[in-house]
Amino acid sequence: MSKRWHNWARTEASTPVTEVSPRTAEQVIAAVERARDTGHTVKPIGASHSFTAIGATDGIRLQLSRMRGLVSADPAAARVTLWAGTHLWELPAILGPLGLALANMGDIDRQTITGATQTGTHGTGLALGGLSTAVVGATLVTGTGELITVSETENAELLPAVALGLGALGVLITVTIQCVPRYLLRAVEAPDALDAVLDKFVERNRAVDHFEFYWFPHTSGARTKTNTRIPVDPALGAAGSGARPLGVVSRYVDEEIVNNTLLGAVVGFQRWLPATTPAVNRAIQGVSSARDYVDESHRVFVTQRRVHFREMEYALPLEAVPDAVRELRSLIERRRFRVSFPIEVRSAQADELMLSTASGRDSGYVAVHRYWRDREDNYFREAEAVLAAHDGRPHWGKMHTLGAAALRERYPRFDEFVAVRDRLDPDRVFANPYLERVLGA
């Protein structure tokens, strides 16, 4: 029996019967055929950054760390094909020399490209979709052991499912990503009053390239982040195109000292003395300062997160976000929850992927967090009720309790996806308890 697995947040664990580290599609096919012959299931695993049990298995685990890097590139079309196990943090070194970048990113880059796209990872920006919307092609091994290609010209009807497939449709071998020309971001970070941010939330999202804000519960203020895209002139490079990056010391202090060392100490302290949480949060808000800098897109998007936490995130109709956040604020005050981690609010453009949280509607995302060692106090369950009541859709890689019946009502194309699953994995070789809950048996 192989070593017991747990995810980054320590919220889920499982013990696979065996683990395989394939290097080729043929070896993946062999693993699927072995599973079929022995009655086991198969689950590929990436960086284990999902907060749910979407990657858990007691069957055969496929560790894809040996299938990483660039397969091919078409710089003229701004497209690259990547091995499935490639991490997001590896992409700047791959895309930069090609003059390319991802169109958008979230604030964590530890995930693999397939883990991120298969769970619906997103950034923020109302003119941009989540990472899965950049998937224009893939090769995958189906539950019957067949290697198929999905693209705009081959099996095109499967692409809206395969691009965000929850790991339920097959083992992805490669993905082809639509990129954009390399660009800079001007980042403006500033404190603001929470009510003022909520009053203008929709307008601010529609007016800029990227907008998000953080709100520490028990305070009246928010920290806003506005990013504006600046093209890089290939002849001038980043410096000649206006880059004004943070200094080495400033970045280190912010990312390592404040966001990790100090945060870890603060939330650890609050865990033992939860009554101090409101005062500590207000103190943090009081020292929040403004910043304005310009840097390569990935350097602005990504923040290093070393303090472990649990997270639940729901996608709501964009216009519902202000009311939902106000209801969360009232809930925290009324139930006297002590919440040390901030609530994060972002947005994404509507898309046509079958199980995208932004499928068919412009969406706002509300994410709630807890320190991973905090005791269970029903905060997540009660916050989930608030967000679900606003026609919320849970992020597939983050904690939630909804099942197939509730999700079918929230996704107009849910049954289309199930039909694709029946076609590509009729015997449920890629099933696990999480998928059985959210998709049905």
Image: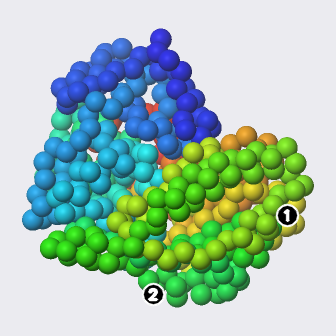
> 388 or 108, which lies in front?
108
* Residue at 66% from the left image edge and 64% from the top image edge: 343
* Residue at 83% from the left image edge and 58% from the top image edge: 277
Total marks placed: 2
Residue named by callout 1: 279
Residue 376: percent from the left, percent from the top? 78, 44
Q: Earlier in the sequence, mark 1 or mark 2?
A: 2
Give neighbour class at mark 1: few <14, some 14-19, many 20+ (Cα, 10 Å).
Answer: few
* Residue at 59% from the left image edge and 77% from the top image edge: 290
Question: Would you say 297 lies left or right of 190 here?
Answer: left
- SS class of the residue under badge 2? helix
Q: Are marks 1 and 2 in contact (CB under 8 Å)?
A: no
User: Mark on residue 365?
Assistant: none
> Quick one: which residue is furthest to the top in this view?
1
Residue 357: percent from the left, percent from the top? 47, 62
> 41 or 219, which lies in front?
219
Q: Quadrant of residue 286?
A: bottom right
For badge 1, the amino acid type reads: Ala
Label 1 or label 2, whichever lies nearer to me, is 1
For badge 2, the amino acid type reads: Ala
> 319 or 428, which lies in front?
319
> 308 or 362, which lies in front?
308
User: Mark on residue 207?
Assistant: 2
